[in-house]
Image (cartoon, grey):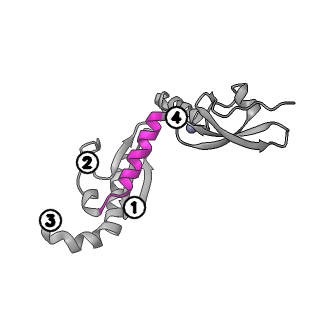
Amino acid sequence: MKRLNLVGQKFGRLSVVSYAGVANNGNARWNCVCDCGNECVVDGYRLRKGMTTSCGCYRREYMKKAIMANPKTRAQMGQRGQFSRTEGVNVSAATKLRITNRSGVIGVSFDRQTSKWNARLFLKGKLVLNKQFVDFKDAVAARKTAEQQYLAPILQRTKKSND
Ligand SMILES: [Zn+2]
């Protein structure tokens, strides 16, 4: 059987640059360069049948678009982004009231999904308090207790400039 020479031909995003030997299944394999710049070795049969048309970047792009087109997934990604931003909060930022905080109490926020109050305290990137309460008062109390336990010793050192 005469082997086809695919060098110089283009299949989808792949340009065939050279012959890469015979695969275990007897098919010729070809060194290809993808439009994205990646190099890959592709089975000649798969190339000619249009089964392989990129180094894999097409599929990755397609999946990414599918994810971004889904509003639910996008919302989840947004939440995760916010969460990680909160984690790095330092003491001075933690004691400033955030405008988006509906409760009016630092570190206490209402969770619409569970209809409960979250009491949280981040310290040096760690969540030292993360509890949910039915009662707003309880959540505030938990936050205050945690503040005294974790923040007070640090705040005392910096208090002079704040008062
Ligand atoms: Zn590619």
Q: Residues within 10 Å of mark 4 (few under 14, many from 20)?
A: few
Mark found first going from the N terminus, 2 or 4: 4
Q: Which residue is mark 1?
A: 125
Q: CA distance from mark 3 to mark 1?
A: 23 Å
Q: Are marks 3 and 1 in contact (CB under 8 Å)?
A: no
Q: Is residue 6 left or right of residue 113?
A: right
Q: Quadrant of residue 7?
A: top right
Q: Which residues are magenta?
A: 74-90
Q: CA distance from mark 2 to mark 1?
A: 18 Å
Asked if the stretch drawn in magenta spans residue 78, the answer is yes
Mark found first going from the N terminus, 1 or 4: 4
Of badges 3 and 1, nearer the viewer stands 1
| Residue positioned 76% across, 30% down in the render | 4
At mark 4, the secondary structure is helix
Q: CA distance from mark 4 to mark 3?
A: 47 Å
| Residue positioned 47% across, 38% down in the render | 76
Q: Main secondary structure of the magenta part?
A: helix
Q: Nearer the viewer, residue 101 or 55?
A: 55
Kindly tell me whether mark 4's CB lies below 8 Å from ligand 1: no
Mark found first going from the N terminus, 2 or 3: 2
Mark found first going from the N terminus, 3 or 1: 1
Residue 62, horizontal then vertical, whole percent: 55, 30
Q: Which residue is mark 4?
A: 64
Q: Which residue is mark 2?
A: 98
Kind of residue sitting beneath label 4: Lys
- Quadrant for the C terminus in the image: bottom left
Q: Which residue is mark 3?
A: 162
At mark 1, the secondary structure is loop
Kind of residue sitting beneath label 3: Asn
Q: CA distance from mark 2 to mark 4?
A: 33 Å
At mark 3, the secondary structure is helix
Furthest toward the right, the residue is: 1
